[in-house]
Image (cartoon, rainbow, N blue to C red):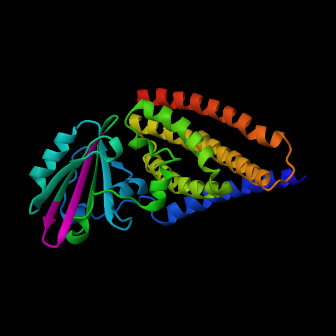
């Protein structure tokens, strides 16, 4: 009977940890875009669609969540087209700096920094699977000029170990196969840190990251019934993340915490049933098999986007 109580406790423990992280991500902004870009006299590249600049992306660029940041993407223009457009259409703005960098071996990101009086505009542009993504940050120049160096918010950075990014940020099919598989493995291992406390820490971080995925899906759904084909495929991928990968991650955290407590009780010399040690490993292999199959499905769906 005592083991049944532990099982119930672990489920409440892991689900609550994720839920608190998700609530925190939504409360803290979750990547909501600002509406002051055009008001600052900055033109929008013709024919683009709105792109959700997530909390995770802001974190990667060192952009505070309360700064106005609007995102867009286009399937008909290259990075060079977008960069050249803003070089020629930023009237009364002076180009202060251009740069490029490749954060954590990802696709190269190109940036432009503009100044007009006391105001600043920071533009970042990168290639995505089906086109070009770019974002525009506006605000006081003293604040805007510091953006682009990276170094993110703590829980967003921590969540990268156990989370799948917003589908819009995926650039290749193999990344989905890797994410769907390795997030499960990482959660199972990290949940065992500090005798199960790691499960709460990393599920909280996962919840923060998932709030960004939900925000991205909300942006797509708001376009109904005129959802572009590319967005529709991103919606499918987002649903796979939330409906399959997330429950499997929570299950992995449950098993990791269960195994951690087993080790703790063993170190203290308490009596333990033999199946207590074997059951989490057996279930984890089942979870990994499901994750690999789901990753293949997601990779195939992405190839059609």
Is residue 298 visible to the viewer in this orientation of the structure? yes
Image position, residue 247 (x, y; %): 64, 44
Say above or below: 136 vs 85: below
Along the viewing direction, whichever of 72 and 197 lies nearer the viewer: 197
Nearer-the-camera pick, 278 or 298: 278
Query: Image quadrant of residue 66?
Result: bottom left
User: Residue 48: image x %, image y %?
Assistant: 28, 45
Quarter occupied by the C terminus: top left
Q: Which residues are magenta?
A: 114-127
In which quadrant of the rendered view does residue 43 lie?
bottom left
Residue 208 shown left or right of residue 7 in the figure? left
Question: What residue occupies the far bottom of the structure in this picture?
Answer: 118
Q: Is residue 49 visible?
A: no
124 is within the stretch colored magenta? yes
- The reply, left or right, for residue 8 in relation to residue 147 is right
Residue drawn at point x = 63 percent, y = 44 percent: 188
Q: Decide whether residue 31 is among the magenta residues.
A: no
At a point 23% along the width and 61% down the height, the residue shown is 38
């Amino acid at each position: 009977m005592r083991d049944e109580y532990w099982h119930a406790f672990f489920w409440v423990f892991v689900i609550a940890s994720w839920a608190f992280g998700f609530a925190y991500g939504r409360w803290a902004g979750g990547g909501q875009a600002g509406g002051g870009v055009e008001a600052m006299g900055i033109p929008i590249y013709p024919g683009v669609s709105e792109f959700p600049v997530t909390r995770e992306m802001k974190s990667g660029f060192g952009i505070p969540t309360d700064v106005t940041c609007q995102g867009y993407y286009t399937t008909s223009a290259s990075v060079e087209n977008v960069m050249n457009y803003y070089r020629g259409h930023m009237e009364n703005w002076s180009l202060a700096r251009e740069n490029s960098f490749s954060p954590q071996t990802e696709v190269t990101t190109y940036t432009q920094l503009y100044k007009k009086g006391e105001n600043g505009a920071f533009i970042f542009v990168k290639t995505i699977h089906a086109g070009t993504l770019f974002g525009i940050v506006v605000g006081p120049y003293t604040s805007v000029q510091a953006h682009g160096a990276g170094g993110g918010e703590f829980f967003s950075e921590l969540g990268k170990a156990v989370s799948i990014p917003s589908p819009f940020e995926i650039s290749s099919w193999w990344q989905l196969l890797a994410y769907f598989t390795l997030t499960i493995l990482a959660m199972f291992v990290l949940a065992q840190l500090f005798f199960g406390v790691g499960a709460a820490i990393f599920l909280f971080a996962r919840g923060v990251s998932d709030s960004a995925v939900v925000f991205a899906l909300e942006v797509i759904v708001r376009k109904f019934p005129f959802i572009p084909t590319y967005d529709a495929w991103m919606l499918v991928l987002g649903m796979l993340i939330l409906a399959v990968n997330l429950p499997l991650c929570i299950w992995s955290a449950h098993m990791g915490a269960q195994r951690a407590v087993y080790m703790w009780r063993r170190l203290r010399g308490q009596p333990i049933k033999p199946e207590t040690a074997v059951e989490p490993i057996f279930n984890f292999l089942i979870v990994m098999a499901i994750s690999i199959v789901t990753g293949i499905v997601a990779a195939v769906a992405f190839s059609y986007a």
